[in-house]
Amino acid sequence: QGDTEGAVSFLRTQHDVDAVCDKYGVPKDRYTARPAGDLRASSSPPRGAVCVYAHALEAGMRVPLHHFFVDALNHFGLAPTQLAPNGWRIVAGFIVLCHSAAVPPSLAVFRRFFVLSTLPNSHKKKKGWYYFHPRSRDRSGLRFTGLPDSIKGWKSGFFLLYSTTPWPCPVEWGKPSKSSLADPVLSAEDRETEAKLLSAYGASPVDLRKYLC
């Protein structure tokens, strides 16, 4: 797609933004949505606001943010618009699998299975977009299928979302630290969670379309 960090949003009117929020159940008593105007997704948002992609909501992002989303964004130092839609799908899928397996979602266990990487067309020296891919290419971890191959125009479909309370995650674009990308250290509880997930889902790839409907 090329680097569209400088693109403005095609969601130009309040009606456009309200339609997205209504579709994905953004609570109107806690959040106020506004068109981003001439701001870019990578711009510093106005006070109290964060930039949100419509395709992130389609992929499983919800507000208020699930605590695991908050943990992941804070750990890597990323604003919500830095995570590609398939990145949101993988995080949301992991939460659902943990719920199904009756284990708490652990960031260390998630990082045992998945690695954060820059999107291929992100500029290496800029603060760009990221996604997750399986740490293991063999059968020793969780693997997902059912991810869309490409989503046209997702980088240009964003809006501003104002919250009545401070956002619990970064609102400015950042770059992950080296320590955030290091191999995770698992506690005894994490090892138990890892074993239960592998026992339930490790034999074959999990089709996310079945779980994220």
Image: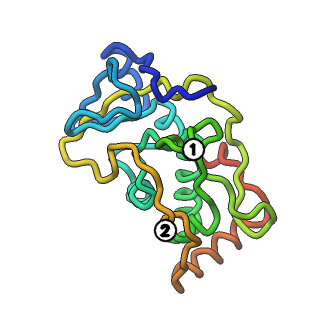
Q: Using the rendered view, name the quadrant where residue 119 is placed.
A: top right
Q: Position of residue 111 (x, y in %)?
A: 57, 65
Res 37 quadrant in image: top left
The residue lying furthest to the front in this view is: 125
Left or right side of 70 for 146: right
Q: Which numbered disc, 2 or 1, marks the residue closer to the eye?
A: 1
Disc 2 residue type (three-letter): Ser
Q: Residue at x 44, y 39 (%)?
A: 81
Label 1: few (<14), some or many (≥20) within 10 Å? Answer: few
Residue 16, visible in the rendered structure = yes
Of 8 and 88, the residue lying toward us: 8
Please, what is the three-letter code of the amino acid marked with disc 1?
A: Lys
Residue on which the image places disc 1: 124
| Residue 48, above or below 153 | below
Residue 73 is situated, as x and y percent measured from the top left of the image, at 42, 54
Q: Quadrant of the N terminus?
A: top right
The quarter in which the C terminus is drawn is top right
Task: Give the Cα separation between the discs numbered 2 and 1.
Answer: 18 Å
Q: Which residue is mark 2?
A: 179
User: Regarding mark 1 in the picture, which secondary structure is present there?
Assistant: loop
